[in-house]
Amino acid sequence: MRNLEKLFAPRSIAIVGASPKQGKLGNVLAENIRRGGWRGKLYFVNPKYSKSRSGYFASLGEIGKSVDLTLVAIPAPLVGEVLGQGAKSSPAVKNFAVISSGFKEIGNEGKEFEANMVKLAKKYKLNILGPNCLGFANPYENLNATFTDVKLQKGHIAIVSQSGALAVALLDWASGKNIGFSKIISIGNKAVLDESAILEHLANDKGTKAIALYLEDVKNGQAFLSALSKITPRKPVAILKAGRTAAGRKAVSSHTGSLAQDQDVVDAVFEKMNVVPADNIEEFQSLVFYLNSNPVPEKNEVIVLTNAGGPGVMASDFVGKSKNIRLLNFSPDFKQTLKKDLPASASVENPIDVIGDAPPGRYQKVLEKIARKFPGNPVVVILTPQNQTDPARVAQILVKMKKRIPNLSACFMGGEKIAAAKAILQKNNIPNFHRPEKALSVIEKLVKYSQELNSWKIPRVELLENPETGVIIRNAIIANRQMLSWSEAEKLFGKYGIRLAKSISFKNPIDLKSKKISYPVALKTDDPAIAHRLEKNAVMLNIQNEKELRSAFEKMSAKAKHFLIQPMAEPGLELIIGMKRDPSFGPVILAGWGGSFTELFRDKTILIPPFGRNEIRNRLSQLKIFPVLKGYRGKRGYNLEEISNIVAAVAQIAVENPEIHEIDINPLVVYNNGKRGQILDAKLFLR
């Protein structure tokens, strides 16, 4: 783990590219640092002014004193030289924030500059933020080391963003909401310090209680998984991931020169690592808004208090569809307690409807009873500005009740009539959402995070020595084959307890004279050059006799030299189980509805190793066909243990054999009559 304390809390800073001219990037950086109130030592580096102006140095090496952090704001071609100078200075400079652009985001020339930066960082063990970044701010040090105006309001949420512009927009939005931050970090192209390194640092940062992270790609999947495993059990990490569509991935590439990941894989990683995902920028802001004022809710039973029936119904509809939260069922005694202070027309069910003529006192009496009986439950207070309503007074009541109901949120709906009330809520850090679904959506996601904490655990992987599988793979590589033959696959799978359907391999019908064939059968090619047999018409089914077999062979013999005969399997439920090796995250396991319509229905779930049997079961339960697997409308279910065993074995194969790039078992035909499932087709692809 890198030590980034001096980078983000420096006692001395040098600005390379400093300038006395207003508007120049180096000048803006210096002025922002001064205006922020940072009290450390500031050095200016620019050979153009080293002789004509005091306080300026020609190079980092001329400073001759300890420099905790260097901000670099010069053209990209000159950055490498500055890094080298700093590393060789006495004392050496180890921490840099490269604000400059013109690196891999502009093409091949920029990629060379960035590659040189990485090389220097490895050689001299440098910490480099950026390049192509905004910089960072640390409100607890009164330090604004960015080229934008930052309101240095202290808080407990760290903002980390791959996009500097998005970070600026978030900060501008937050300043109007009375939201403070522990750190604001722009990571840019993340040539050296990526999201994983920053997360590891923030995991141990005492001032940071939650992290909001905007990402366009994940640089190192395994490091990312490791960093998340250290931080999410202690602090919630909300992530907005861009590049979810083909158009978005193209934009990501042009923005920071990054390669975007498969979104299904990223979603699986987020779920596995208990990340709080944000579906869009509005939800991202809502999560920040809520976490700024409220703790993570631990109870999943929500209480809604409203003076309007319609918004109460909207809240009920949202909760009714949720898998993670529900409305708290009140006991008869509590309902009776509520009735004492409410008119007969009010509703004491949940949502509690104090009706439209509710004065502030009615809100207060109900909230006091909630605070006494249910102080730990999330509470959402809805208000619409009706004639008898005093929104500002109700807002003041919420301010008083916040100490007794920590997870208190407001939904004051309207415009001019609630403006004063919204200002009161904002000043006192009570989140106000413009509609109830927004508040409940945030609560739902944070409750899910909280619930997963109790059971969240990553199992260890035991790697076993299996010399025979290594021989099979090496022989194929020597023969320059990218796919194993059926017999090779059969042997390799067998070492992991996976049995393939009984098959007869042959080259010519003459080879079959000594074989006992029970018709009907299927004829398939067993040629490594033909990966997708159906698309190449390299499979013929329901062959009834020897004559039909010869005819089928003659039609297929021009396509391949090796063939398989398999007995026709009984109809059953067809599944797919597979693996692909993701360039960032490594082996990724897929399971779902298989057969010819796999791509059409796309009913699949993704697992990221390592995982245990509980995780396999949980992921399978997300399939649309899971009710059928479990047993639907009186019919018997299928053998979930058998399916889980194959999923686990495929993951073990992938982890122990890095030369295997892809595994495709499709179809696995499973039965609900007690019979063993049959794998009718299975392929292993090498790198």
Image (cartoon, helix red, strand yellow):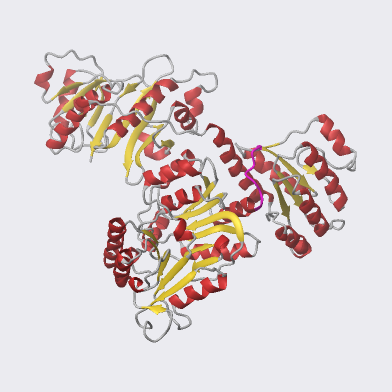
Residue at 22% in and 20% down: 503
Relative depth, front residue between 47 and 456: 47
Percent coordinates x, y for residue 576 in the rendering:
36, 31
Q: Is residue 162 visible?
A: no
Where does residue 435 sit, x and y in percent of width and height? 68, 53
The outermost residue toward the left is: 510
Out of 423 and 262, give the one closest to the viewer.
423
> Considering only vertical position in the picture, is 22 above or below 299?
below
- Asked if one can make out residue 58 in the rendered structure from this viewpoint, the answer is yes
Q: Position of residue 682 (x, y in %)?
A: 28, 29
265 versus 49 height, above or below = above
Taking the spot 43% from the left edge, 21% from the top edge, the residue there is: 641
Q: Is residue 67 left or right of residue 308?
A: left
Q: Is residue 466 left or right of residue 400?
A: left
Quadrant showing the C terminus: top left
* Highlighted magenta segment, given as a residue range: 293-300
Residue 427 found in image quarter: bottom right
Whether residue 26 appears in magenta in the rendering, the answer is no
Pinpoint residue 680: horizontal percent, then vertical percent. 29, 25
* Above-or-below relation of 554 to 547: below
Q: Measured along the vertical axis of the image, is residue 131 above or below residue 676? A: below
Which residue extends farthest bottom? 52
**Majority secondary structure of the magenta segment?**
loop
Residue at image point 76% right, 41% down: 351
Number of numbered discs visible in the structure rendering: 0
Compare residues 270 and 666 and report the one nearer the observer: 270
